[in-house]
Amino acid sequence: MTLPIERARSRKPITWLTILGILLLPAAVGGILVAALQNPTERLDSMTAAIVNLDEPVEIDGQLTPLGRQLASGLVEGSDELDSNLTWVISNEDDAADGLADGSYQAVITIPEEFSAAATSAGQAISDGGGDAEQATIRVTTPDDGLVADDLITGQIADAAASSMGTLLSEATTENILVGFTTIGDQIGEAADGAAELATGARDAATGAAAIPDGATQLASGAAELGNGASSLASGLDTLAAKTREAAGGASQIGTGLTAGAAELQNQVAGAQQLAAGSAQVATGLQQLAETCVPSGFPQEYCDQIAALSSGATQTDAGVQQLATLPATLATQLGEAGAGATTLADGLNQLASQGLDESAAGARALSTGAVQLSDGTTELATGAADLATGLDTLATGTGDLAGGLRTASDSLPSFSDSESTSLASVIADPVASKGADGATIFGPTAIPLLAAVVLWFGALASFLVMRAHTARTLTSRRSSAGLALRAFAPAAAIGAAQGLLVSLIVQIVASYDAATWWAFAGIAVLAGIVFAAVNQALVAVFGGIGRWISALVGVLAIATGLISTVPGWLADLGASLPTAPAFAGLITANGGAAAGLIVWGVLSLVVTTIAVALRRTTSVKAAMATA
């Protein structure tokens, strides 16, 4: 069934089938693009990647650390934050190369031999207090004929795994450093306590040292007096020794005299004994005479006198007998006294030589030592004063040291195990991004961009098939505005229908809430109508070149809507296109976007009307050519 709509560049009428094809073209294109690009991470398991683990594990503190194996395990396991993961195959270098060549693998992740050594080099350098750190790397290889986004997906998954491994190692290293801060702070605190105790001890020592000079001065004075006294004692002992020698000489003389007297008395012992014998004979004779006097007839008086004389002689004899023993006894005693005097003289000489002389020498040595002691204690007093000053300075310095160490201890952070773990996690990965998904190129603005572009190309398709104005423009009785609107009406209806169909496709994929979808659908319908007006104006003014211009506008809309790093002049050109307000309105429906579209639509209709008006004047030759 044909329709009263003129076909471009042909006299054949347009059928409903043509209209249906134009109507469904944006919906088909948009549906295909959305279906292909929406949520690619949900279908990552359709991609196969190989892991070639060449890593040689290292030993840290006696424990084997196979980081390459852990990274491979992390890649295979995937992330809890992702809906899916690639299909991973643990392979070797030859199989991986063959798989890339025949298309079995879309990517190969190679973990090099030195991966564990390099990954742990930073922590090892910190632990050893020196050494070079090396960054661990992995190699991502994709086939030369791989699809456009395959490199992006596999590279980002590998980067995410490597980043997770790096974050894990950084957390462990940083946690050890934070624990080290706490340990160092505690040790500095202990050092501060020790310095404070040292300062207190130094202060006490300084106080004690300050008292030493007075005591040392007194000791020096006493030592000087001791030296003088010892010197006097030595002089006295010398005098005493001399007197003792003199006494020894006298004792020696007394001994000699006593010995000589004893010898003399000994010589007189015989005479005394003879005297005693004679006295005994006299007493015996008188006694016998007295006894025989009376019997012999001597007178009594005479006999009494003889008896008295005999008694006296007996007493005298007793005395003489005693006196006779006295010289021998006295000689013995005088001999002993002489020997004792001689011994005394020897003892006095020994006392003088060994006792008094040595004591005098000792007293002189004591005097010399006392003088030296006095000099030494004087120097001690001076040194003690310097010591007190030094100890006071030491006390002040160690007090300052204790304060500085305490400040340093208080300034160093101290963390519990849980705090160290938490801080290490944040320090190792201090910044996180939310909202933007780096694993997909199909972000929140992709649907509005695709919708705007397919609606634009849908409008272009309309005027690939339909005329921008009737072929009877020159002869028609209608006004130029009427002719422009008559050609615009079916394209606008088709554009509105295209906008509604695209909105329905988008809703199936994106599941917008009701308010968001109605706003999206309203802008999409308005964009379809306005794009029809703009494409009509381009074709009406430039003819076939206008269709090329329209195609370039669509390409520019895609180019400036995909990424923000386009050149400034190109971004400014994209912002001036009629697709810009449609793109902005489809992202967030607002009055400014709708107004911009309406302005473009009105201006386009005005331009089309002017173009139609200009087409209504011609030359005879041109009129004959169209007849």
Image (cartoon, rainbow, N blue to C red):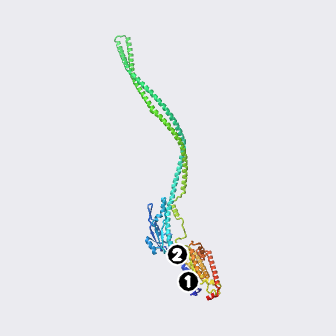
For the C terminus, the image quarter is bottom right
- In this rendering, position of residue 516 left or right of residue 243: right
Report which residue position mark 1 lands on.
20
Q: Nearer the viewer, residue 569 or 380?
A: 569
Gap between marks 2 and 1 measured at Cα: 26 Å
Percent position of residue 90, x then y: 44, 70
Percent position of residue 465, x then y: 57, 84
Callout 1: SS: helix
Callout 2: SS: helix
Q: Which mark is residue 37?
A: 2
Residue 137 in view in this figure: yes
Q: Earlier in the sequence, mark 2 or mark 1?
A: 1
What amino acid is labelled 1 in the image? Leu
Percent position of residue 226, x then y: 51, 36
Give the vertical position of 212 relative to 459 (above or below): above
- Marks counted in the figure total 2
Quadrant of res 57 = bottom left
Give the vertical position of 435 relative to 373 (above or below): below
